[in-house]
Amino acid sequence: MASSQDHVHILAYPFPSSGHIIPLLDLTKRLVSRGIYVTVLITPSNLPLLQPLLPSHAPFLQPLLLPDPHQKKLFPLVTATRHLHYPFLLSWVQSLPSPPLAIISDFFLGWTLHLARDLRLPRLVFSPSGAFALSFFYSLWRDLPVNPDPGSADSLISFPNIPNSPLYPWWQINHYYRQKKKGDPEWDFHCENMLDNIASWGVVFNTFSDLERVYLNHMKADLGHDRVWAVGPVLPPKYDDDEGSADRGGSSSVPCDEVMTWLDSRPACSVIYVCFGSRTVLTSRQMEVLTTALEVSGVQFILSVRGPDERHVGQDVGVIPEEFENRVRGRGLVIKGWSPQLAILGHGAVGSFLTHCGWNSVLEALIAGVVMVTWPMGADQYTNAKLIVDEMGAGLRAAEGITENIPEVAELSEVIKKSLLENITQRVRARELNEAALEAVEPEGSSHKELDALVKHFLELREAERCFD
Ligand code: AWU
């Protein structure tokens, strides 16, 4: 990289999973547009996500290609990244004439705090989840609440030190936390990972203050400093094929223009889009209830379903029922594999989104101004559903969990139909949050200003570094 002391150079290290890489790459584009040099640590299997950005952002955006860990499950994968990448990064940074001034890395890569300390660099956490969700994770692994009734998975666990004192049934708590104990390597990894995040120099959120102000303020008070930046939504504000939105995160299993043509022939707000992120596969029971409800509801829909991968070997994975596609032909489009989600949500025919509440999907729904129908199934999704349904009033609750709260077909069908009604209050709220999300990233918007403030911090780090030269 042709860099000099005049340049600010940052190392960005995404966790190797689509839902984590996509937003961090979106953030690096915004940093690069402000003249920051960013080296992105990427592995060969994820290079296709970065490659399309390189030509138009060179020389500011550079890849650092490091080996792919072969593990797929979270704990072994993160442990492998540490063993594979730590030694190389240590020597690579020390060899550079113009080393990075800071490391910004995903919240699953807490170990990079120790790498940053070895390199005498600040480490910033990149949170691909919101501030409510991260506040919950921090409280869980630091305050270590216990189940008052160990025999019951439905015991309610309260988090009184988080605004609005959220309550969660025990079964919704992280399964490592519930099923493992202190001293177990996986339990210890998750605990140490979150404590390392808490101890890091700062945190950058893909969120915006109108959505999570109370949790952002809580995070600053909880951490004892104000190095907390809400710079999102970092995704492209509208579907723009020049930006490769059609293939954002992967190439669509059905050509994007075919999907757009299918939508073009439908009235505004008449279609529900159904998708559960880049990793979730449904069980047979979930698939049966979902497809039957879509069928009996009579609505128009796009259903995007993922097939199983090596993580699901031996698991019960639901498949699209025989003849389902023929029975709904003309009003239902099934996409098996990867769908052009940003393009679909941005189309005027789409009025609602049945989602697992992955944070990227939540933000994309807000940017599109569509009503969310929530079916959280793990991770931060329960918290995200609480925010959208209970606090923001911009969504309808359909179900929760993988086996716990599967709705009756008639019940799910009614929620699906309601989500497409024009005059529901959730649509009013979704449109208000849509305006707020778009305003936040406009010049003079809160997120735009916070990103400028973050860049200013980087410039101050460079000045400080010069003082030591
Ligand atoms: P999203 O955050 O919606 O879901 P996951 O992939 O499950 O993300 C965290 O990472 C979430 O908060 C967690 O809950 C965890 C994970 N996409 C697409 O374009 N086509 C598809 O067919 C499927 C997905 C895109 C979608 C979004 C991303 C999924 C941050 O669940 O547009 O950008 O993939 O991220």
Image (tube, rainbow, N blue to C red):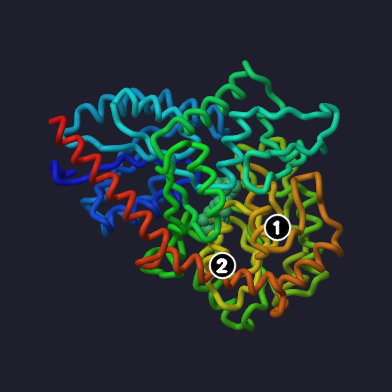
Quick one: quadrant of the N terminus?
A: top left
Residue 181 sits above or below residue 386 on the image: above
Q: Where in the figure is residue 137, as x and y percent of width and height?
A: 59, 37
Earlier-in-chain disc, 2 versus 1? 1
Residue 266 sits above or below residue 294 on the image: below
Quick one: quadrant of the C terminus?
A: top left
Q: Where in the figure is residue 106, as x and y percent of width and height?
A: 45, 40
Q: Which mark is residue 405?
A: none
At a point 40% along the width and 65% down the height, the residue shown is 445
Q: Amino acid at mark 2?
A: Leu
Label 2 secondary element? helix
Q: Is residue 398 left or right of residue 66?
A: right
Label 1 secondary element? helix
Q: Label 2: which residue?
A: 433
At a point 39% along the width and 67% down the height, the residue shown is 442
Q: Where in the figure is residue 183, as x and y percent of width and height?
A: 62, 16
Residue 49 sits above or below residue 201 on the image: below
Where residue 232 sits, quadrant-wise, is bottom left
Q: Label 1: which residue?
A: 390
In front of the other: 69 or 164 = 164
At a point 22% along the width and 27% down the height, the residue shown is 94
In front of the other: 193 or 406 = 193
Residue 260 shows in this picture:
yes
Q: CA distance from mark 2 to mark 1?
A: 14 Å
At a point 60% along the width and 24% down the height, the residue shown is 186
Numbered label tally: 2
At label 1, counting other C-alpha atoms closer than 10 Å, the crowd grade (few under 14, some 14-19, many 20 or more) is few
**In this view, which residue lies farthest toward the top?**
183
Q: Where in the figure is residue 339, as x and y percent of width and height?
A: 56, 61
Q: Is residue 50 left or right of residue 135?
A: left
Q: Amino acid at mark 1?
A: Asp
Residue 255 shows in this picture:
no
